[in-house]
Amino acid sequence: MGGRGKRTNGQVKPGFMLRLLPYRTFLRTFRYVPRLAVSLVIRNRQGAVLLTRRAIPPSPGSWHMPGGFLLKGETIRQCIKRIFQRELNSGLRKNRCVFFDGR
């Protein structure tokens, strides 16, 4: 459960198993600190967007864009690679990152 990564000097490194908090405990963390969410919009050459089915709460079984939260000491690019690997079980071959704040 969770992705692999080892923390060294605040950085996430390959090889260490990240543990996920129980869902209710995870929700309580929002009371204490803001969390940066990252969603991946993955399009093919025809412009179709990839959706996956959620396996975990909230809303297991619903369609969504792959995503997750930035971990402490992780860059946004590292976060994108980790989410891509965890959710799609694949590595990035070619990518173009576009950042926006959703406002």
Image: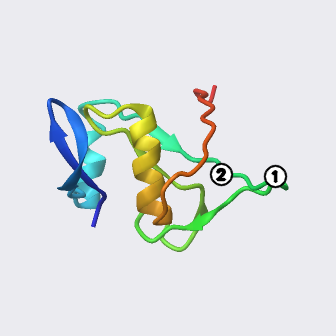
Choose top left, top right, bottom left or bottom right for residue 103. top right
Instruction: Estimate the x, y position of residue 31 in percent, counting from the top left.
Output: 27, 35
Q: Considering only vertical position in the picture, is 37 above or below 73? A: below
Q: Which residue is mark 1?
A: 47
- Which amino acid, mark 2? Ile
Q: Is residue 63 left or right of residue 29?
A: right
Q: Earlier in the sequence, mark 2 or mark 1?
A: 2
Instruction: Estimate the x, y position of residue 7 in percent, counting from the top left.
Output: 17, 41
Q: Is residue 39 left or right of residue 27?
A: right
Residue occupying the point 40% across, 41% down: 79
Q: For the residues marked 2 and 1, what is the alpha-carbon distance in whole angstroms? A: 9 Å
Report the residue that reaches farthest toward the left.
9
Q: Which residue is mark 2?
A: 42
Q: Is residue 18 left or right of residue 50?
A: left
Residue occupying the point 26% across, 31% down: 73
- For residue 8, say whether it is visible: yes
Mark 2 neighbour class, 10 Å CA radius: few under 14, some 14 to 19, many 20 or more:
some
Instruction: Estimate the x, y position of residue 5 in percent, counting from the top left.
Output: 24, 50
Q: Considering only vertical position in the picture, is 45 above or below 73? A: below
Q: How many marks?
A: 2
Residue occupying the point 46% across, 62% down: 87
- For residue 58, say whether it is visible: no
Choose top left, top right, bottom left or bottom right for residue 99. top right
For the N terminus, the image quarter is bottom left
